[in-house]
Amino acid sequence: MKYCDLILDNATIVTLDQDDRILTQHALIINENKIIDIIESTQAQKSYQAKEVYNLKNKILLPGFINMHTHIPMSYFKGLADDLPLQTWLEDYIWPNEAKHISKDFVYHASVHGIAELIKNGVTQFNDMYFIPEQTAKACIDTGIRANIGDIGLDFPMGDFHQPKSSFEQINILKEKFKDQQTLTFTLAPHAIYTCCKETLKKCRDIAQKENALIHIHLSETAFEVEQCIKEHNLKPIEYLNKIGLLCDRLTIAHGVHVDEKEMELLKKHNVSVCINTESNLKLASGFAPIKKYLEYEINLCIGTDSVASNNNLSIFDEMSLTAKLHKALNQDPTILPASDVLKMATLNAARALGAEDKFGSIEIGKIADLITLDTASIEAQPYYNPYSLIVYTLNTSAVSNVIIDGKFVLKEKQFLTINESKIIVNAKEYKLEV
Ligand SMILES: [Zn+2]
């Protein structure tokens, strides 16, 4: 008899392993923060003595979603300004309000709020860029979520909390300050090529190389951005980053809506990942990412929601379902983006983009236990034939019943264990801006 911390028993497990195995009546054995065994349920309690046995009858167990493009502390800007073009929305509404209202407390509480939404949506890890990142880091520690956090780089000051060209040095301060936190990774996050000059981007490249850091940037989001880049540099955005030397396998570009085939060759050559943000692109009318072409070039695609100010929710279910259906229609081809591939964009491909495919994104022995369960006992879930179809086309956030991060429950039977939900709602009302 071996000892373990947790047995998740009687599960239907969508493993997303190399053979895409779907296991029924199986148990997942977890010790500390790792998956140490996957065995038939009949054998689980004969082989292991656990501190806790949790029955997953009528539930699907799958890897937690990884939201690859967020600005989590923007929670209190949800619905502040809608139905506007990107530049007007940013320059006339978002930036002035950020400059005026953001403080350490604002970022902490807004982060906790955003993290609560992420957890309810089955997200176990996110890739964020924003101001005062140590406050988001603290919110992650307090709530138990895993995150990759970058101090957003902008060439102009913002309030009294952001000075231009100081962002990238933050990475060393943050790494030192939070060095004992294995659930946090710090990244470099230049906002965009229209807000960071060439010198800033070169500085980012140098620090990224020295620190072996992940990089996260908005790129080729609008046609206007591409036009400006050609006008200023006589290059398209990805060619421009290539010239600077920023393209590498640690780079994830958010959006990638206006990208041509020559640029895709560069993305493939340097193993750059692209984060698709369908709802944000639709709402801001930025366009449609060329997903079919990306797939032809075998570019690693993952999924993000962007902020609640431009989406306006953090639902990975919505992103998966809409992305799959939209691109079938756009290409007049219902066979592209099958449900299993879309689910991988939200899990395994994201882990690959983070250089952490050996730790996250699938349910395999040795990987970290970042997991979610979805209820299948409801009317809307029954009957089902194929779990991928159920997850991508049928279910939504309301099906998420348990969220386990780093081997620990943070949501159990739909109840938060690390978050005071009523306090979050009170704070949201208090922090709501006077407009
Ligand atoms: Zn964004």
Image (cartoon, rainbow, N blue to C red):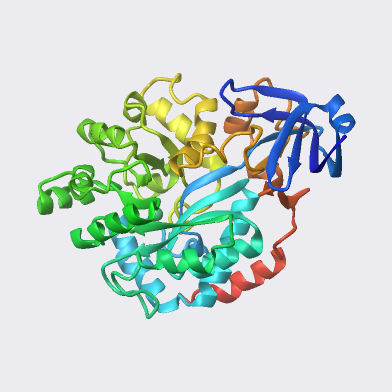
Q: Is residue 100 left or right of residue 420?
A: left
- List x then y, in percent, for residue 177: 52, 69
| Above/below status of 131 relative to 367 | below
x and y percent of residue 168 in the render? Answer: 35, 64
Q: Is residue 203 above or below residue 173?
A: above
Q: Farthest residue in the bottom direction?
A: 160
Which residue corresponds to the image point at 34% horizontal and 39% vertical from the top-left?
A: 272
Residue visible at 54% across and 44% down?
Answer: 66
Q: Is residue 1 or residue 318 the one in the foreground? A: 1
Q: How many marks?
A: 0
Q: Looking at the image, in which quadrant does ligand 1 appear? A: bottom left
In the displayed structure image, the side of residue 30 where residue 326 appears, left or right: left
Taking the image as drawn, is residue 85 in sight?
A: no
Q: What is the x, y in percent for residue 416?
A: 73, 57
- In the picture, the quarter occupied by the N terminus is top right
Q: Residue at x 20, y 50 (%)?
A: 244
The relative height of residue 258 versus residue 90 in the rendered view (above or below) is above
Q: Is residue 63 positioned above or below 338 on the image?
A: below
Please tell me which residue lies in front, 245 or 299: 245
Name the foreground residue: 403 vs 380.
403
On the image, the x and y values in percent for residue 143 come to 65, 61
Instruction: Please report the residue visible at 32 percent of the width from the left and 46 percent of the height from the top.
Output: 286
Question: Taking the image as drawn, is residue 89 in sight?
Answer: yes
In terms of image quadrants, where is residue 269? Answer: top left
The image quadrant where one finds the C terminus is bottom left
